Amino acid sequence: MSAADGGVAILAGGGALPRELADRLAVRGRAVRILALRGFADRGTLRRAECAFDIVDALGIIRRLHAWRPAAVVLVGVVHRPTPRALLGAVAAAYRNRDFLLPIMRAGDDRLLRTVVGLFEREGFTVEGIATLAPELLAGVGVFGRVEPTAASRAAIGLGVRCLTALSPFDVGQAAVVAGSRIAAVEGPEGTDAMIARAQRLGRTSRLHGGEGGPVLVKMAKAGQDLRVDLPAIGPDTVRRAARAGFSGIAVGAGATLVIDRATTIEEADRRGLFVVGVDTAQDVPGEMSE
Amino acid sequence: MSAADGGVAILAGGGALPRELADRLAVRGRAVRILALRGFADRGTLRRAECAFDIVDALGIIRRLHAWRPAAVVLVGVVHRPTPRALLGAVAAAYRNRDFLLPIMRAGDDRLLRTVVGLFEREGFTVEGIATLAPELLAGVGVFGRVEPTAASRAAIGLGVRCLTALSPFDVGQAAVVAGSRIAAVEGPEGTDAMIARAQRLGRTSRLHGGEGGPVLVKMAKAGQDLRVDLPAIGPDTVRRAARAGFSGIAVGAGATLVIDRATTIEEADRRGLFVVGVDTAQDVPGEMSE
């Protein structure tokens, strides 16, 4: 059995994505086992999981993986670093797992995921991502819904892509808001939602002249971002927030952005009059985008 | 009389800077007249002003300047775009001045100052800035107070300078916060104070691992920024905010950043244990800075 058709262990955090991925893998005929992370995985995921582990229980997870020897391990869904309280609540387990936990607790946010991936790889596992396991879950190039970006919006998208590309080596935002011909916000560690709220406040205090149609959210991966575990994502909630903030639409990097719950995302965008578009970020200016 | 020693008309907004500049020009033996902007210039400036104008009264300002014909016009101090309410409050004057006001009201924030400069230049005046009139008010290269940046802080400053340099063509922030080896925030139109507050919140929710000593504020001009009317600035209040946010210090671009009330700024920094340093932003990495 080659690695490509071997079993896949899904280490599952929050949200519907772990189940979506399990479904896509099942279609491909691959053996899948879900290892749910307690406190993060939701009910639907827990129901389909083979077992559930406390996030502190690295040893337990690794033992289970060694027993199965999957061809690939994939980490998907929302997970946070264990809080000090969670560590105290499971202090015996934390002590038992200290060799795994210490590097994780010490790593900055930017190195956190790399540290976790490193742990699995040192144990001999292959960590894969959605891009190789189920690329159809990622945004492609083109307009997703019924709303087309205007020429002005396309220009704003181009500006956002160029700005994020220039910023890429600095491990800062994977998203920006462009209002007319101006960058209104660059995302930092606060995340996309907080940045949208910030742009909204700017718009309210009219420090932002949006051009017709409202600002555009541009989201794409940074250079060197480990897409196996850290994939830019948008979903129905992103569309709702962007609509409430008066945005005209959302552009994402094609081939490297996850569209969570794609049907609902497009439905919401259509209903609220926002465009959602996947752009080839390697091209300098997406002045003309293929549909 | 050459332009260099001719009269200087100071169009004065808020803060102490218009008076500081008038003092420096007086030391140089230049004739100075302060034209105060009503509603912006503070009491001390109004007392020394030759006359005061409503900001809407562009015609009045220009007529007065034509009567005097100064060698240079300089715009200093805090001024905002007229609010719709201010325009309605002076609707007759606004109508009289519509040819001047319309381009100003239509220009985005980024083009606002360029538009104002253009108006004066079209009337035949030479608009100058502090860099040519009183360069001693700008930050030089070196450590200003008693606190020296650590090697880690110098590395953080270098990262901030490189990031802002990369962002420079995009007319976005003229400041960033660097925490350890990570860009924690890039300033948008919300301004430096709001960005410091944002970085502070990130630190509180521990999404930010600052490295020893706390984050560093880096502030410098963008490429193509019109330094005659749009000079990055720090002052005592910047130091206080940075200290409250747990920052270790502030780095500014030498030769292109205004240090408002320099004595108090340094005094505050010394008392709160923050460094304030001017760096040559043209050098790639200020790993070693001359004192």
Image (cartoon, coloured by chain):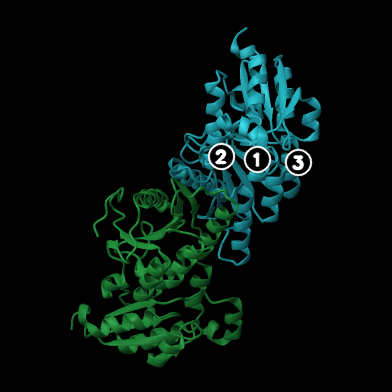
Chain colours: A cyan, B green
Question: What is the x, y in percent for residue A203?
Answer: 61, 62
Amino acid under label 1?
Answer: Leu
| Residue closer to the observer: B237 or A92 | A92
Disc 1 crowd, CA 10 A, few/some/many (<14, 14-19, 20+): some
Provide the residue designation for mark 3.
A267
Q: Is residue B264 left or right of residue B286?
A: right
Query: Label 3: chain?
Result: A
Counting the numbered discs, the total is 3
**Vertical side of B62 occupied by A246: above or below:** above
Q: CA distance from mark 3 to mark 2?
A: 40 Å
| Mark nearer the N terminus (1 vs 2) | 1
> Can you say whether B155 is above or below B13 in the image?
above
Q: Which residue is at 63% across, 59% downward?
A: A200
Between B44 and A251, which is closer to the camera in this rendering?
B44
Q: Which mark is residue A87?
A: 1
Disc 2, SS: helix
- Nearest to the eye among marks 1 and 2: give it: 1
Image quarter where the C terminus of chain A lies is top right
A244 displayed left or right of B229? right
Residues behind callouts 1 and 2 on a single chain = yes
The first of marks 3 and 1 along the sequence is: 1
Q: Are marks 3 and 2 on the same chain?
A: yes
* The residue positioned farthest toward the top in the image shown: A1
